[in-house]
Image (spheres, rainbow, N blue to C red):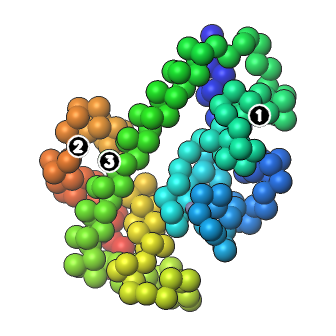
């Protein structure tokens, strides 16, 4: 049986945001998870806020915007986008979905910790300064030291996405070797592009 959650998850998130009445500017919305004054939250394959780190799928976005639970959110998405939910979502379906979401959140937390470790390291090497000049010289709202700037941390997060092979990250996660060892692997392995930022 087709997994209805993956079907709903495949609807372009930008369209979902629009249908929710959220203003989409260059693929971003004002974040619904923090007090956002400029669009910081990317809506593509789910959402990801550069400023506060909020991350989730279409259903999470609908839940937040409409203040509802999983089932009504799924029903709303189905209705708006013509996806037939041809069976009743059972409590087992929803429990499985929630377990997968919880896994994703733990994975995101682990990943954040790795990124934060990398950021500390690269800060020492002035890589962050280079990123700062490239992206945010024109004016970041945080009027503070770049090393503490959340937007820079978000940028590092974004670079990480491009540099760190996702399968590799997932393998480390699956092996349960997160922590110092996987940080070392992440640091040593496929990060040549990351290093290139400073050149
Ligand atoms: Zn946010």
Q: Out of 106 and 176, give the one closest to the viewer.
A: 106
* Residue appearing at x 23%, y 79% in the figure: 125
Q: Is residue 143 above or below residue 147?
A: below
Which residue was labeled with disc 1?
77
* Distance CA(mark 3)–CA(mark 1): 30 Å
Which residue was labeled with disc 2?
178
Q: Is residue 29 above or below residue 142?
A: above
CB within 8 Å, label 1 to label 2: no
Q: Do we see residue 2 in this rendering?
A: no
Q: Out of 23 and 1, give the one closest to the viewer.
A: 23
Q: Out of 25 and 70, give the one closest to the viewer.
A: 70
State the mark number for residue 110.
3
* Residue appearing at x 75%, y 44% in the figure: 66
Helix, strand or loop status at disc 1: helix
Give the image location of residue 166, x and y in percent: 39, 44
What is the quadrant of the C terminus in the image? bottom left
Give the image location of residue 22, x and y in percent: 78, 57
Q: Is residue 143 above or below residue 63?
A: below
* Distance CA(mark 1)–CA(mark 2): 35 Å
CB within 8 Å, label 2 to label 3: yes
Helix, strand or loop status at disc 3: helix
Q: Is residue 29 above or below residue 20?
A: below
């Amino acid at each position: 049986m087709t997994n209805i959650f993956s079907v709903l998850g495949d609807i372009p998130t930008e369209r979902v945001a629009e249908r929710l009445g959220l203003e989409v500017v260059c693929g971003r919305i004002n974040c619904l998870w923090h007090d956002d004054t400029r669009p910081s939250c990317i809506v593509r394959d789910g959402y990801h806020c550069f400023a506060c780190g909020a991350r989730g799928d279409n259903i999470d976005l609908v839940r937040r915007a409409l203040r509802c639970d999983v089932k009504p959110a799924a029903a709303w998405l189905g209705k708006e986008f013509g996806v037939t939910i041809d069976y009743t979502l059972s409590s087992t379906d929803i429990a499985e979905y929630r377990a997968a979401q919880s896994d994703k959140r733990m994975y995101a937390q682990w990943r954040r910790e790795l990124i934060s470790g990398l950021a500390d390291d690269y800060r020492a090497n002035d890589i962050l300064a280079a990123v700062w000049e490239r992206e945010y010289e024109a004016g970041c709202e945080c009027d503070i030291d770049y090393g503490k700037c959340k937007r820079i941390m978000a940028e590092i997060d974004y670079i990480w996405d491009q540099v760190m092979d996702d399968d590799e990250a997932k393998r480390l996660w699956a092996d349960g070797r997160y922590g110092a060892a996987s940080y070392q692997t992440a640091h040593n392995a496929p990060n040549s592009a990351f290093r290139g930022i400073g050149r």
